[in-house]
Image: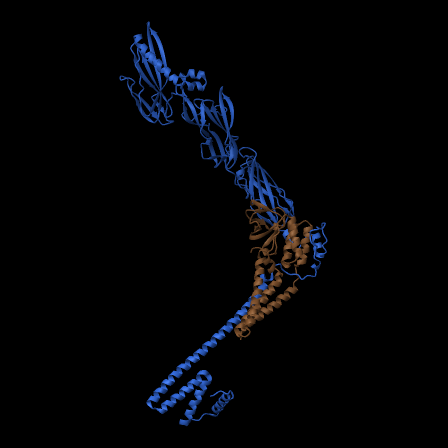
Chain colours: A blue, B brown
Amino acid sequence: MRPDFLRGGLLALMVYLCAAAPAMGIASLINATLQPSQISMGESAELTITSSGSSMQPITLPEVAGLELRIIGQSHRIEIINGATLVTTALIVRVTPQAVGIFTIPGITPKSEPLVLRVNPDGSSNSSTLGSLSSGKSPAGARADGIRLTADGSAFVRLILPKREVYVGESIPVDIEVGMRDGFVTSLNGLPTLTGADFTLNNLSRQPERVPKVIDGKEFTLLTWHSLLAAVKPGKFSLSVESPLTVRIRTRPQRESLLEDSLGDPFMQNFFGATVSKEITVASPPSDLTVLSLPSAGRPPAFSGAVGSFTIASDLSSATAAAGDPLTLRMHVSGAGNFDRVDSTMLERLDAWKTYPPKSSFKPSDPVGYKGEKTFEQPLIASKPGVQTLPGVTFSYFDPATRRYETARSAPLAVTISPSLADTSSSVPPASVAAAAATGAGTPAAPPSVSLRPDHLAAGREAGQNSLSPLYLQPRFLALPSLLSLAFAGGWLRLRRRASDSNGSRADRDRGVAQATHHAVMELESAARAGNATRFFNAARTAMLATVGAGLDAEGEEIRQLFALADEANYSADQPTTTEFERWIEIVRQRLLRGKPP
Amino acid sequence: MIGRMPLAMLGLALALTGCHLRAADADEPRYSAAALYNLGNSYARAGKPGLAVLNYERASLLAPNDPDIAANLRFVRASSHLPSESTGRFTRAVTVANPTVVSWLGVAGLAVLGASTLLGAVSSRRRWMRHAVTALGAALVGFTVCNAVVLWPTLHAAVVVTGATPVRVSPVPMGDPLFTLPEAETVKIAAEHEDFVLIRTAAGKTGWVSRANIVPVVPGESLP
């Protein structure tokens, strides 16, 4: 910012003085002082190098790690003492620390004593010099209008509360003003914030209002934010707002900056290198605020936390509708308060109506949403036709003005519900339509269209149906093909099983006969080889009996039994009874009548 | 020879047939093709194309080959600026008779098919005649199945009966509208949720419509 020619001019002047000193016949003497010797981070100290005498040595500024030394000015004084001319030249160097600590600045000349500078953390310095520098927090002592300027008079922050007593959850509109002296404040580094966690700032306007203002004869730019302040817990609080800024601060004591102040223009001060940029946080004077709890007595069950002053109204999307058609019941809550807590379930249950949860929308009438109208829309579907009355909707809130709970109620609404088109589509057509359809004469309710084909005259004589659904999809009818299928499937399975059983028994019998024949032939061949006639013929008879009895199980057994009885009759004296004789006569007769060989 | 149980089932089936026919005679019929057609004409003249199309669709279920019904259905749809669906040869062939007749033909075909199968299991005489009868029964059953397949979409269709019906993204009245359906458009019912029906248009668009805005072609039919 500072022009280079200034530095060049100063150096030329210093060189001229150094060169002129010997001509004046005064020995040069260099002295250095550091003021103050203790500063905070962000502040600067002044190193003054005074050269006296008839000459001045060239000066090389020392380099100290952590310190920035920069020539910011020079002055010279000529005194005549007892006819002798004494020239004194002072070089002013600004010393800006880059870190906290104790720094030693070596002597300017080999014979000079080193200087010590103590740099404390930001805000802990008790330095009284450099009065134009702000320590970051504004000291107490606000004006009557609530404005408390920073120490250097560059900025202020003010919180404007409409009242000093609020309820928990209540929203109150507040204004936050940040005044910035033109040219002293270079930037605003963030939005204003509250200093405590007991309150919340809602709906803070993004862009502040900007107006010029003159305070104590100095021009300020006033930025104003609008917001809603809400307390989260009861108690007595001291509320403050702070805002981060970047300001230009003087680098020389105010008492030595009379010329700069007389110039008045910060640009001129910058021109002469009298200011540096510094980030500070400016806080507003604390404001006392009492937060009260909401009373528990008289709290309505439907109270949702709304605090303010509200009125409600309701309306319907239509005064007539068909059964099944959705209607929209609207409830308008207007007024001022914490609309974020304004809520309602409207009509939860209603006979002959199907209700849905409402949805809400808010239309603010001020920038922060303190005033406005919140609209709840609840879809309703009537299930029965007729004239029906919807009850009024209610809304409960706490009014801080009256300090009690209030319940607002809207007027009931009448609505006419007609039968649904879906219900009247075929069974209950409109009167004119029904008449036309019933007669089948095509009596039109409106002029007939030439493109519509005429009605069917056989409408009354045609056989009708009970259902439009095809018979093959009706459960009662479906039982018929199902049973038919089961019957045919069962019969087919039965026939298959019988055929399978018959084939199986015949195969078993044939297999038994083959085995018996094989054994008998073996026995016969054995008896023949032995020459045993009795054994041979007994075996032959047994084989024949087995062969005969294999085809018919029961009859074969009877035949075998008959042959056994005959043998017993030949070789024993046992005589069968009369009953046994009759039984065997009947068996033989039946066998002979059937024509089968015994 | 066949067994007692299959015979009992056959007897029960015949008894059911008798009961069904007697019940059909006893119940007062609610629908006739001519009455529905006349009702559709009346709605069309009254300027209610949605209800007109609905009744024409119902009438065409009972009398699928009635040229008057088809002509008036086309006319009302054209008047409502809606396209008419063209029917193919196969569709016309399998809907030559009304579904009731087709149902009885299917039962008769099933009986013929079953009887010929049983005869084939008992006797092997006149095999060519048995095969012909079996083919006839199978053809009748197949005809009934094809009729059901062709009519299935219509049985689960609905007609929009109100103008500019909103189709919503979700089955709630406050759901965001996707598009609107014109009156008399026929849509397919895909799902149901409380008072809303998920529909699919002929163009393939889907959304939820209030039950009050559409009427199923077949009352009581909803989900396929």
Q: Quadrant of residue B144?
A: bottom right
Q: Residue lying at the far left in this picture: please name it.
A: A111
Give percent across and percent down for residue A85.
Answer: 33, 7
Tally the marks: 0
Measuring 70% from the left and 60% from the top, which residue is drawn there? A460
Rendered location of residue A379, percent (x, y):
58, 46
Q: Nearer the viewer, residue B222 or A265?
A: B222
Residue A168 spot, x, y in % from top left: 50, 37
B204 with respect to B51 (left or right)? left
Q: Is residue B161 left or right of residue A26?
A: right
Q: Does residue A509 sit above or below B5 in this rendering?
A: below
Residue A385 visible? The answer is no
Q: Work out whether residue A9 can be spotted.
A: yes
* Image quadrant in which the N terminus of chain A is located: top left
Looking at this rendering, what residue extends furthest in the front direction? Answer: B128
B27, above or below A554, in the image: above
